[in-house]
Amino acid sequence: MPDTLLHSYYSGPFLLAWDFEPYILFMLIFAAGLYGLALRRIGLSGVRSVPRSYPIAFYGGLIAFAAALAGPFHTYNENSFALHMGQHVVMMLIAAPLLVLGRPVQVALWAISPERSGAVLGPFLRRGWIRGLLTVVTNPIVVLVLLNVNLVAWHHPDFYVAALESTLVHEIEHILFMSTALLFWWIIIDPVPRHHKVRADVAILMLFISGSVGDLVALYLIFVPDVIYPFYLASDTLWGMSELADQRAGGVIMLVVGTAVYFGATFALIAKNFGNTESIHNPAGELQQASDTV
């Protein structure tokens, strides 16, 4: 373990433990401003109105993203496994789906004329290799493998500790967590082009599989008898918790939030598609058919 932690020590009130890296702050301001500009252009055009839920979800996602990368979760993630787990949970299960629910691509396309959007996207999407790449990366099997293998791999002690000891590795970890989560929620909720959206029954199966993988990792963290991340044995824990109790708390956070989000999304899909016999049938067969295209 290095002699110094990646973050400077903070001794103030817990909820005020915020530390914005310049590139994180720029990214958040840029995304919020660009989305707001698109909303203004749509409003001035008078052609259509954006559902209020879109900006609420998008800006809520940005707030969650900021809390994960600049708030107490980030400041104390080298002192508490539970808070580090909370950081990952907020990124993947709260910020990512909220950002997708904000439909930023759709809002951006609505903000410009159809002629301009076609001129920009047409040549791009007509390239064969781009269409092929989109087909591969939006395949349900590929998405499931990317999301869940990435999740399990980064919780292996070697990779997990490497991320804590190296700023570069830690940032790579966060990029992979966020990108795979965005891809997962994007094909379930509302992708552009829309034909990459998976059917409701396939989405429900994907939610079940991903939720089960996360729950298995969480249960292992809760019931393993020893501390599996030695990094925390050499750091000061928060609130007087033992390292083992802190590890188990992290597992509980992953289990509770993951189960709630995946179950909630599954319930929403079932409610939305209830009674549609064409949408709910043989999801395992659909996944097999999708895998044949890769």
Image: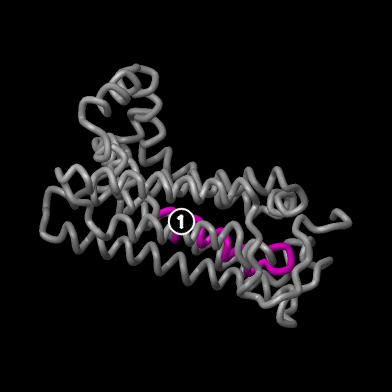
Residue 14 percent across, percent down from the top left: 65, 75
**Residue drawn 69% across the image and 69% down it:** 80
The part of the image, by quadrant, that contains residue 232 is: bottom right
**Residue drawn 16% across the image and 46% down it:** 46
Residue 220 percent across, percent down from the top left: 60, 65
**Residue drawn 80% across the image and 58% down it:** 5
> What colour scheme governs how the chains and residues are painted in the rendered image of this protein?
one colour
| Region in magenta | 77-97
Residue at mark 1: 62
Q: Residues within 10 Å of mark 1 (few under 14, many from 20)?
A: many
Q: Quadrant of the C terminus?
A: top left
Residue 124 sits above or below residue 240 on the image: above
Judging depth in this view, the residue of 172 and 254 nearest the camera is 172
**Residue drawn 39% across the image and 65% down it:** 261
The part of the image, by quadrant, that contains residue 115 is: top left
Residue 98 percent across, percent down from the top left: 38, 57
Residue 140 sits above or below residue 252 on the image: above
- The overriding secondary structure of the stretch rendered in magenta is helix
Judging depth in this view, the residue of 86 and 225 nearest the camera is 86
Q: Is residue 100 left or right of residue 95?
A: left
Q: Is residue 99 left or right of residue 160?
A: left
Is 79 inside the magenta-drawn segment? yes
Residue 9 percent across, percent down from the top left: 78, 66
